[in-house]
Amino acid sequence: MREAKSSDSRNSDQYHWKRVTRPHRHLTTATEVKRVIDLFGGDRSRLLDIAEAVQHRFGSISDEAVKALADGLGMHAVEVEDMVSFYAFLDREPRGRFRVRLSKTPISLMKGAGDVARAFESALAISIGSTTPDGKFTLEWTSDIGMADQEPAALINRMVLTELTPADVPDIIASLRHRSNKGDEPPFPLHPVDGSMLPKAVVKPSLVKAGPLLSGPLGRDDGLRAALSMEPGEVVAVITASKLRGRGGAGFPTGMKWRLTAKAVGSDHYVVCNADEGEPGTFKDRVLLSEFPDLVIDGMTVAGYALGAKHGLIYLRGEYAYLWDMLQDVLANRRSAGLLGTNILGRKGFDFDIRIQLGAGAYICGEESSLLESLEGKRGTPRDRPPFPTERGYLHQPTAIDNVETFACAARILAQGAAWFSGLGTAESTGTKLMSVAGDCSRPGVYEVPFGITVNELLDMVGAPDAAFVQIGGPSGQSVAPKDFGRRIAYEDLSTGGSTMIFGPTRDILDIALQFAAFFVDESCGWCAPCRVGTTLLKQGMEKIVAGRATLDDLKATEALGHTVARMSRCGLGQMAPNPILSTMRNFPELYEARLSPEPFSPRVSLEDALRAAVLIQGRASVPEEA
Amino acid sequence: MAAEPIRFTIDDVEITALEGQSIIEACDAAGIYIPRLCHHPELEPSGNCRVCTCKVNGRNSATCVTPAAHGMSIENNTKELNDDRRMIIEMLFVEGNHPCPYCVASGNCELQALGYRLGMQAPKEVYQWPDRGIDATHPDIYLDHDRCILCSRCIRASRMEDGKTVFGFSGRGITMRLNIDATGGLGETQMAAIDKAARVCPVACIVIKRDSYRVPNGQRRFDLAPIGSDIEARRKQVKS
């Protein structure tokens, strides 16, 4: 089996962005690329990091850079391109030095993202999707960036701006223009400007209500110390006894996952923290990582001990790159305190360290097998199972992949005991759940609630007396209508990763379903036919419905297509992608009926539009049909 | 330790599989046809098209990538599955440009043949009319990207069988494309007409030049017998 290279987690500090950002203007692309490859020990499984560094240095990954990457890593150019072209944050063509990415979600649009976008367009004199002629700014939309409680939000390079208004835009542009005149800055820096210099470059703390998980004294190594008083097998037994289930939404029993991973044979075992929090509307992992990073890492270290793993990896979504330095500091502090590294807390032979892998803009990478592919420096295509990651995961070795919140729970369970945890929540759903709440409510934010809480109770808590519908679990979850507000947040009823988007009575439910359908078009990986083509066809079907041009037959065809995509797609993305359409059809049939075209047949193409060019050329209109 | 025999049932027929066989391989050997498109018996499976999806122990699974296991109970030739398979074929028809009446592959095309076998009339979905271009830079082969169904057969064949890695994907989602290992077209690659990669395309994306009408329309493979009938003929042999 492959040896962990020098570039692996043991030397996670070896590479530092700043070493790449020092401009070496006299060097050729090939030389620079070679230098980056060497920083990562020539390890092709680190291609995502390498490509990010090259992009960071040059602003894009040119044909020349692709060739240099291929040569330096012993790959074919087509293989490099296969990976690079997959990620939204990697570019093959040059783009503006400042990359303004506006978060486009139903909630951001409700909060005025459209006006903010127009303000950027007019301040920069370009339209969305283009770059200013001086090459300084590129303006574009991006999928949800994890700031649903403080929209409209945007990323400018790696920096996050929140609660934007059109009035902020001129100052932001002016500040960036001023900055970009400074000659000593490297091109395309990771942190282009000191955040405090830019208006609205601040992420507010989002935790509104802490419960048992996040309150009380939280020592940074409570979980680990408790774990070390037991045998690794006992730690797994404690997790099993707590009945902890995966917090990403799927709800797989964590104890079983850890047991399967621990007993699987491999040269190395890996602990992976899924921090690719991409489900629109969710931001609770951002809260955990920014406000409780030690708790999460304590949980990962507990897992490292329980599974006999030496390496941990945090897959951090590219949108959360602004947390990079802070998280590296936390890791460094833990290393100096003997909580990471070799012989942890003096336990001979217990070696465990953590590396952070930055993602590059791909929702699919939150799917655990896509995440593994991405960690290995490939395009984020899901894997077919079996084998499961517990048996063959990262680098084909046994791997336990858990959600950020799951690790936080694991640390607390070790510290407080399985009975404390299983005493909370319901029979099938023990503990508490972090809910990310946003939309039409007076107190958006993260709420820690006991499992079993009803949607109504949650709505009261967050100040949403007149919700017309609630999207639970993000676009891939369910649209819950008022008649179902008595349902409970729990694996046995409404299973969710925590995304809760509230929509009031004035919102257009079908238009929101269409926006979700468009999201899946952007985020489908393309590997399998039903999802690749089906998501586009579903969006087009929904467009026709929303435009009031769909007939009853069209409606039925879209519904049937949705079921086929759900049944035939390879992974959860495609299987869930039709949910917004199918669940609104189920819950709000009257809204669909109201939009039906009165005609028995309505063509998708307008004959007039199709003939317009020909009419122009010929200089005469077509002869009207005789009545 | 002698391996236990792997026995499973598909549509109530009992089949014996060898250790390491996928469901589709075991069924092929036994003469049970499961419709498929991206799967090729001489290539590693990749699970792109999902046409070979069966209900395995009540759960939909692509049988090209699912190992045969003892005691499995599989549904294959059911209306629901065939309807879903036909819908996938329709999706592929509207995603690319597939003008059967004047296509060089007509009669040899697996997409067309599956359309016939699964009872497709005309696709009801919206044609996407892609404009991905033709690559005629190679002296012996041309590539019509508008006909590509992204099955990855050529990618796998070029990498594993030819050892050349001429092909790959680029992009994602509906904008995903077949990509080649050169900036100036297929003519710049090591591709040769005798390569495996040039012979596995199920449609008319990769076409050998000057070779297309040796067998006239009407006498081609699927003009003579429906797709899958070679496999089903084995079943008759197995039975007798």
Image (cartoon, coloured by chain):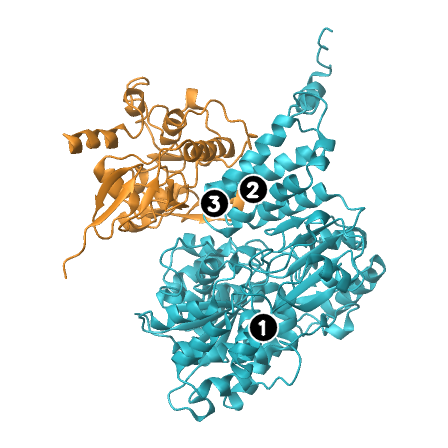
Chain colours: A cyan, B orange
Q: Residue at x 67, y 52 (%)?
A: A471
Q: Nearer the viewer, mark 1 or mark 3?
A: 3
Q: Residue A511, image x and y in percent?
A: 71, 42
Q: Is residue A374 left or right of residue A580?
A: left
Please tell me the numbered disc located at residue A41: none
Let me know if marks 3 and 2 both belong to one chain: yes
- The part of the image, by quadrant, that contains residue A537 is top right
Q: Is residue A434 left or right of residue A80?
A: right
Q: Which residue is mark 1?
A: A21
- The part of the image, by quadrant, that contains residue A616 is top right
Disc 3 marks a residue whose amino acid type is Ser
Q: Residue B191, image x and y in percent?
A: 32, 43
Q: Which residue is mark 3?
A: A569
Q: Residues within 10 Å of mark 1 (few under 14, many from 20)?
A: some
Q: Nearer the viewer, residue A83 or A471?
A: A471
Disc 2 marks a residue whose amino acid type is Thr
Let me know if marks 1 and 3 both belong to one chain: yes
The quadrant in which the N terminus of chain B is found is bottom left
